[in-house]
Amino acid sequence: MKRLLITGLVILLTGCADRPYVPTATIYNSSFNKQSSNATHVRVHRIKQLTGAGLGEDCPLVIKVDDIEVAGLQQNQYIDFFLSKGEHILSIRLSCALTAWKKSLAVIADGKYKEYQAELGAVGQYRLLQIK
């Protein structure tokens, strides 16, 4: 019985362990992938969480820059893209959302690397936080 309990605990902890983020394969607009010397490198990653886990691959979190769809993220995925200097609006929204709700942030592209974390709240709200 003790072995069974320990085995179950190990399996549970293994399933909950952090997995590395992987790049998304769902790219809607590759023009943001072009790196240049005066562009700002931006990374957005969607964290793994229980909220939204049952939505599946048909409902990615869509990343938009200035109202242009850039990529779709599943949980534990990221997208790297490059912005020209100046102010841009970064927004996220589930592609299958029944409401027009979204989360938007102003991004000042100044040549310095920027990283954002995207997630869904427990009651359907979007979160987009700058972490670097």
Image (cartoon, rainbow, N blue to C red):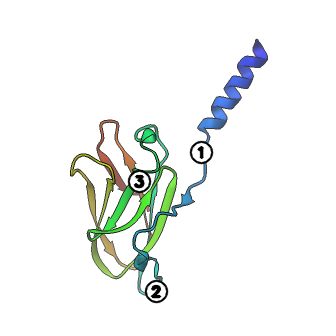
- Up the image or down, 124 lies above or below 25; here it is above
- Location of the N terminus by quadrant is top right
Disc 1 packing (10 Å; few <14; some 14–19; many ≥20)? few
Residue 55 % position (x, y): 41, 43
Q: Secondary structure at mark 2?
A: loop
What amino acid is found at the position of numbered circle 2 in the picture? Answer: Ser
Q: Distance between the Cα atoms at labels 2 and 1? A: 33 Å
**Drawn side of residue 15 relative to residue 81, left or right:** right
Residue 112 visible to the viewer: no
14 or 112: nearer the eye?
14
Q: Residue at x 26, y 53 (%)?
A: 102
Residue corresponding to mark 2: 36
Residue corresponding to mark 3: 60
* Outermost residue, left side: 100
Q: If you read the primary sequence from the N terminus, does the residue marked by circle 3 or circle 1 appear first?
A: 1
* Outermost residue, right side: 3
The reply to whether discs 2 and 3 touch (Cβ–Cβ < 8 Å) is no
Q: If you read the primary sequence from the N terminus, does the residue marked by circle 2 or circle 1 appear first?
A: 1
Disc 3 packing (10 Å; few <14; some 14–19; many ≥20)? many
Q: If you read the primary sequence from the N terminus, does the residue marked by circle 2 or circle 3 appear first?
A: 2
Residue 86 % position (x, y): 29, 80
**Which of the two marks, 2 or 3, is nearer to us in this view?**
3
**Which of the two marks, 3 or 1, is nearer to us in this view?**
3
* Outermost residue, front side: 58
The reply to whether discs 2 and 1 touch (Cβ–Cβ < 8 Å) is no
Q: Residue at x 21, y 52 (%)?
A: 100
* Outermost residue, top side: 1
Residue corresponding to mark 1: 18
- Location of the C terminus by quadrant is bottom left
